[in-house]
Image (tube, helix red, strand yellow):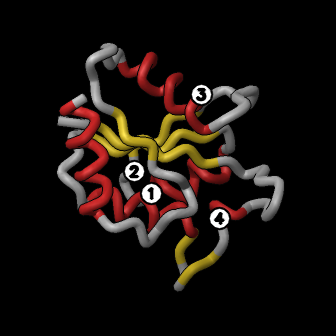
Amino acid sequence: MYHIVIPARYSSTRLPAKALADIHGKPLIYWVWRQALQSTATSVTVATDDERIREALVDHGADVMMTASTHPSGTDRLAEVAANKGWGDDCIVVNLQGDEPLMPVVNLEQVASLLAEH
């Protein structure tokens, strides 16, 4: 049993609004979320500090958690989600980058499995 958290920022330094970049009529972050849903994860949560990203996903049924805008990294955003959801220290959380729509599901499963073993 594991969870996936997808941190997504609007203010990307190299490509602003990258999470909302159109790919075949849907935002990039939508495709990342859809890919994560193909896994055996117990839950998939998108963590963002931007209402535009939340709005792009909620109509599709995504679990989106608004997080603080002060986080220096996606890992900090993930930690906020874990704390707010009450996940314990023994809970496995896989951090899927918000710009990885082609991440093979087998890789997500392998990461979760390795975390469970160690």
Q: What residue did someone put label 4 on?
A: 20
The amino acid sitting under disc 2 is Ala
Instruction: Judge depth for marks 4 and 1 and give the one in front.
Output: 4
Residue 40, position in %: x, y? 18, 51
When the figure is inspected, residue 16 is found, relative to residue 85, above or below; the finding is below
Label 3: few (<14), some (14–19) or many (≥20) C-alpha neighbours in 10 Å: some
Q: How far, Cα to Cα, is label 2 from label 3?
A: 21 Å
Pointers 2 and 1 in contact (CB under 8 A)? no
Mark carried by residue 59: 1
Residue 68, position in %: x, y? 67, 26
Instruction: Judge depth for marks 1 and 3 and give the one in front.
Output: 3
Q: Where's the N terminus, which quadrant?
A: top left
Q: Residue at x 53, y 23 (%)?
A: 80
Pointers 2 and 3 in contact (CB under 8 A)? no
Q: Where's the C terminus, which quadrant?
A: top left
Instruction: Judge depth for marks 2 and 3 and give the one in front.
Output: 3
Instruction: Judge depth for marks 3 and 4 and give the one in front.
Output: 3
When the figure is inspected, residue 88 is found, relative to residue 112, above or below; the finding is above
Pointers 2 and 4 in contact (CB under 8 A)? no
Q: Residue at x 62, y 77 (%)?
A: 22
Q: Which residue is drawn at 36% across and 43% down?
A: 4
Label 2: few (<14), some (14–19) or many (≥20) C-alpha neighbours in 10 Å: some
Q: What residue did someone put label 2 on?
A: 62
When the figure is inspected, residue 2 is found, relative to residue 81, above or below; the finding is below
Q: Residue at x 61, y 52 (%)?
A: 53
The amino acid sitting under disc 3 is Asp
Q: Nearer the viewer, residue 118 or 86?
A: 118
Q: How far, Cα to Cα, is label 2 from label 1?
A: 7 Å
